[in-house]
Amino acid sequence: MAPCARMKKISTLPPFSKGQPQPATVASRPVNRCDQLGAHPFSDTQDGLFRAYLSDAYAATCKQVATWMGEAGMTCHTDAAGNLIGRYEGEKPGAPALLIGSHLDTVRNAGRYDGTLGVMLGIEVVAHFAARGERLPFALEVIGFGDEEGSRFSASMLTSRAVAGTLDALPLSAVDANGATLHDVLVHNGLDPARYLEAAYKPQQVLAYLEAHIEQGPVLEAANMSVGVVTAIAAQYRFRVSIQGVAGHAGTMPMSLRQDALAAAAEAILAIERLGAAGPEDLVATVGQLHVGPGASNVVPGETTFSLDIRAGTADVRDRAATAICAALKDIAKKRNVTLSIEPQNDLAATPCDPQLTDLLATSVTHVTGQPARRLVSGAGHDAMVMAALTPVCMLFLRCKKGISHNPAEAVRHDDVHTALQVMLEFIHALAASTASKPTEFSA
Ligand code: GLV
Ligand code: MN
Ligand code: MN
């Protein structure tokens, strides 16, 4: 891509002034919309936000977001995987698209901005161009992905994998917390399981992918910066670990004869924490889910299942940690005379963002903020890491309060959201200028 040549006439946002009422389109609207989507009927739970893939709350959310997409000037549809997609045509109808996306599903007891804010910012970007009747040499598509978090089934990023064309087969017999299979959930939502993979884009339909997301960490706040540019996304593994012991009477089974699956899991979890902490700083290992069977106060636990999430900046560090953790778990199982199974769920390679797009985004940050862009690696997973298999990707991070995320206390500043929007517009203008000088890049 050619270095950023500025367009003749660039549409920008009015300056943000603290304490003043803001025009709805500037910064307050995307934040307010995230807040609106943080409660009933857009949440599956009354206490705290939880929006699972293809749940009733997800359907209500897609309906509401589709209305906002339409008001912003997009035509929208739900794809074969249940993603919500809005399109704003470029100068020539049918041109390849700059995709601007993030996810609409959430973790349990979530914050309101993880994923959702990126989708709302995409809508705001299109609203900006549409309000001015400004067309670009490429189309803009805003994608609200349905399953980034693994919010319903244990595999995550099903929907971006479908769009990127990297999903070979669907885990149709995977079950949710209520025992419903993915197959049945799709059918219930009017989606044809046999056509799911048709959500895939052809590479020639797409120019690039941009994702704006809260940082979910404390780096930008510590550096007193509104936004930052992601250089790469950490490698991830997810496993499901099961330990089978022997259930017994809590009053009669002597301590020396027990095969307690929960005590074994407890020792395993502490080993995971120790081995995670023993590696380099970018290595993290987490057990976030634990099920105990049969789960009665007077029964020695006979079985446990827990999740294991391992991440690092490079596959090498992650893989060495995974090998050490698996060996430690096997030793614990042997010593305690219980049966262990470790089932891989997800293997996501470390994903470098596209260097040229990232430079263009960094230049846009500098134009808007007057400061060199802070570059950082994302420890959190994002749809961008999957979309990188389809098209060059880049990511803009927004500061979030105290770095807190996956927590209802997630918070963003309106002036940071305003800055992010300005950066996205600047980036799109620069991309338009650089691609306009290379029309052959766009032939479908
Ligand atoms: C998604 O938020 C993840 O990083 O697991
Ligand atoms: Mn998340
Ligand atoms: Mn997210």
Image (cartoon, grey):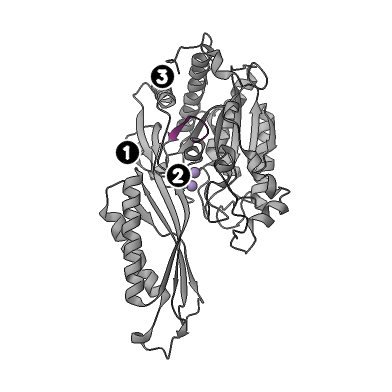
Q: Which mark is residue 367?
A: 3
Tell me the residue at 37%/21% (across/down): 370
Q: Secondary structure at mark 2?
A: loop
Sequence order check, earlier mark of 2 and 3: 3
The answer to whether residue 238 is above or below residue 334 is: above
Dot 2 crowding, Cα within 10 Å, few <14, some 14–19, many 20+: many
* CB of mark 2 near ligand 1 (< 8 Å): yes
Q: Are marks 2 and 3 in contact (CB under 8 Å)?
A: no
Q: Position of residue 261 (x, y in %)?
A: 42, 75
* CB of mark 1 near ligand 1 (< 8 Å): no
Q: Quadrant of the C terminus?
A: top right
Q: Position of residue 414 (x, y in %)?
A: 48, 34
Q: Magenta stretch: give its range.
A: 389-397
Q: Which mark is residue 441?
A: none
Estimate the spatial distance between the alpha carbons at disc 1 and disc 2, rounded to whole Å: 21 Å
Q: Which mark is residue 222?
A: 1
Estimate the spatial distance between the alpha carbons at disc 2 and disc 3, rounded to whole Å: 28 Å
Q: Secondary structure at mark 3?
A: helix
Q: Are marks 1 and 2 in contact (CB under 8 Å)?
A: no
Regarding residue 254, the answer to whether it shows in the image is yes
Dot 3 crowding, Cα within 10 Å, few <14, some 14–19, many 20+: some
Residue 391 is covered by the magenta coloring: yes
Tell me the residue at 50%/74% (across/down): 293
* Residue placed under numbered mark 2 in the picture: 381
Estimate the spatial distance between the alpha carbons at disc 1 and disc 3, rounded to whole Å: 22 Å
Horizontal side of 14 relative to 61 (left or right) equals left
